[in-house]
Image (cartoon, rainbow, N blue to C red):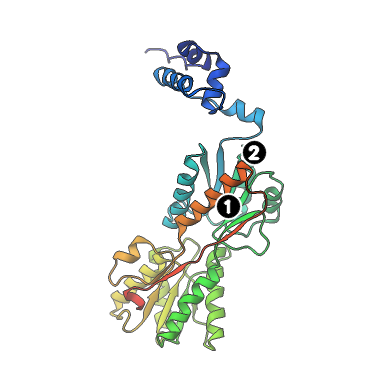
Amino acid sequence: MNPPKRQPTMADVARRANVSPMTVSRAFKRDASVSDATREAILAAADDLGYVFDSTASNFRSQRSDFVAVTIPSINNANFADTVGGLIEGLKESGLQTLLGYTNYDIQEEERLIEQLLRRRPCAIVVTGGKHTPRARRLLENAGIPVVETWDLPAAPIGHVVGFSNAAAVRAMVDHFVEAGRRRIAFIGGDADRDTRGTDRRAGFVAAMEAHGLDASRLIAAGAPPISMREGAEAMALLLERFPDTEAVICVSDLSAFGALTECQRRGVPVPGRIAIGGFGNYEIGDVCVPSLTTIDPYPRLIGEETAGLIRQALSGTLTEPTRIGISPRLVLRESAS
């Protein structure tokens, strides 16, 4: 067996490019003192040798890294994936990378991850939602770096905010159903404390129903977040048994709404003739299923893009005050609740 090859060093690159190791370091950090021709020669030498620049020591000296820490509640949710995608694309030209932490809708886990991520000295941190444990909030407040809360509009933001009111978004769908003449309306999901955004959507449903002078008690639990299509179907079955005269139902997500739709199809309940169904998230499945799903588009990729813009401005020094960017979700009318 051949012994493993020695990893090339900065000194090796310097010898190959006929420059000093300090010039190699400056070239990788895109220092303006290195000419374009010299930088290209250094990068070519590094590529020939298979050298990868180690920024750890440099970051330690400068007290600043080249990555942005991000916490998300789900790694298989298309909405959060779109947000992260918009963030990554928006940071690419700045040479910044992202390091993800997965909270699984658990604010205690979020606290643990925030502490671990801050130990790695990110240049900024992005968190999903505006509700945190007291200790997590203290960690963020004292981090000394830009903090961006997303997917929410917290009453007491820590730093920057890019989000929307989940409650107001659902109220728009309630208003649509009422204007369409449907008054016996139910809500599926949003009962678990772990999903604060789902809880806000449920609260928005209740507030909107009461504002119209309607009964807001048709609330069906659907399990712990993230609610699956199967759980949406089970919740719909329970709704039809408890409240068989329901005229419309709003689901906490498109996945649960798709499950509710399939349960109606199994039971021969016409949609939207007998009952209208609305979801949340504008997932691709809602556009291709039959009937297609009415939903709310929260513009998840835009959230990531706007967050990246705030981070770029904050790190460049052009943004010195906390900024709040409100996103306006759109009601997307399709066949399930036209």
Along the line of sight, which residue is nearer the eye, 65 or 290? 65
Picture residue at 61% right of the left edge, 30% below the top: 59
Quadrant containing the N terminus in the rendered view: top left
Residue 224 spot, x, y in % from top left = 50, 63
Mark 1 crowdedness (10 Å alpha carbons): few <14, some 14-19, many ≥20: many
Residue assigned mark 1: 127
Q: Is residue 291 visible?
A: yes
Give amino acid for label 2.
Arg
Q: Is residue 84 above or below residue 17?
A: below
Residue 258, by quadrant, is bottom left
Quadrant containing the C terminus in the rendered view: bottom left
- Which of the two labelled residues, at mark 1 and mark 2, occupies the earlier sequence position? 2
Residue assigned mark 2: 119
Along the line of sight, which residue is nearer the eye, 98 or 221? 98
Tell me the tag on residue 189: none
Q: Is residue 88 above or below residue 225?
A: above
Q: CA distance from mark 1 to mark 2?
A: 16 Å
Give amino acid for label 1.
Val
Label 2: which secondary element: helix
Residue 56 spot, x, y in % from top left = 58, 28
Picture residue at 40% right of the left edge, 73% below the top: 278
Picture residue at 54% right of the left edge, 64% below the top: 164
Mark 2 crowdedness (10 Å alpha carbons): few <14, some 14-19, many ≥20: few
Q: Is residue 73 above or below residue 286?
A: above
